[in-house]
Image (cartoon, grey):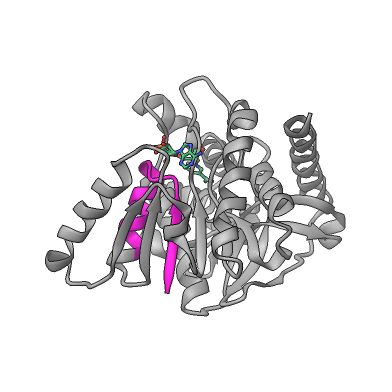
Amino acid sequence: PRVTIVGAGRVGSTLAQRIAEKNLADVVLLDIVAGMPQGLALDLMEARGIELHNRQIIGTNNYADTSNSAIVVITAGFPRKPGMSRDDLLKVNAKIVVAAAKNAIAFSPNAILIVVTNPLDVMTYLAKQATNLPRDRVMGMAGVLDSARFETFVALELGVLPADVKAIVLGSHGDLMVPLPRYATVNGIPVTELLDQATIERMLARTRNGGAEIVELMQTGGAFFAPASAASVMVESILLNQSRLLPVATYLQGEYGLENVVIGVPCRLGCGGIESVLELTLSDGEKAALQASAQSVRQNIHRAQE
Ligand code: NAI
């Protein structure tokens, strides 16, 4: 199979490396900057003999070269600068994502679209609207990353293996994300048994601020290693038809009492894209948090369309 990545910046190029080196698919890297994706592709091709894989990596500025991709990942657009919120990227990135989605789907009409560009939930909504794809074939990456951040902080606090910590974060990708700490475990043991409430709250706050913490430290752009890992897991579950149950930004059609909006909820990802949406029983507080999250996404969808 072939995966196209639109936007060969830091997230896009790292994702290309992950996909090729996990031997999941051939990769087409597309960017507007002339020569840049071609150079990255050549560099990745030259690593193949050392990394022991035989995947093709093509760099291009032309959508015709992306034809017949099974998956298109959109990472094109601007990342945050220090002091900016994801919503500050709204208008500038909306144009880029809408054009990228339309162009890519014109050459790969059967592709599954994974949006990464921020503000994530709004961009995913606009990509769905622009392409008219069914909801199982348009999704956004955020929850896998936000969950991984929370898991990281729990693992660091307890001194346990990160892979042993499992948690899920729902809602929009931003300050109004909805972590569900009561579902977080270390190999099945609830985190609420292992850590006091104040410590958990501190880690949730750090998770909400996880992207900004890295933007502030780096000063030039944001996180890209963990985001690329998170996107690659979604690509993998689709290509290998693993049906993994992951938090995915999806277009809701009445689930959780919400419709005509995109936010993160647990979804099973397989070869057709989103195979099903899992509706968890939420407490009143969690429901209210999810509603608030959806409401902010709706407002930004309106702003983007003004
Ligand atoms: P970057 O600046 O390194 O890369 C973006 C690339 O997009 C650049 O190479 C640029 O030339 C390209 N580009 C711009 N307009 C384009 C167009 N019209 N067509 C094709 N390519 C175009 O940025 P980075 O760090 O890779 O981040 C990319 C996006 O992903 C940002 O919006 C960032 O906020 C978002 N992001 C989202 C995450 C999530 O959890 N959903 C996590 C990390 C980043």
- Position of residue 294 measured from the top left corner of the image (x, y, whole percent): 77, 44
Q: Residue furthest top?
A: 83
Q: Residue furthest bottom?
A: 241
Magenta span includes 3: yes
Asked if 24 appears above or below 59 in the picture, the reply is below
Please name whichever residue, 175 or 234, is drawn nearer the observer in this view of the structure.
234
> Seen in the image, is 298 located left or right of residue 215?
right
Regarding residue 158, the answer to whether it shows in the image is no
Q: Which residues are magenta?
A: 1-19
Please name whichever residue, 263 or 17, is drawn nearer the observer in this view of the structure.
17
Task: State the quadrant of the C terminus.
Answer: top right
What residue is drawn where x is 32% and y is 53%? Answer: 59
What residue is drawn where x is 65% and y is 65%? Answer: 137
Asked if 17 appears above or below 215 in the picture, the reply is below
Magenta span includes 35: no
Please name whichever residue, 134 or 205, is drawn nearer the observer in this view of the structure.
134
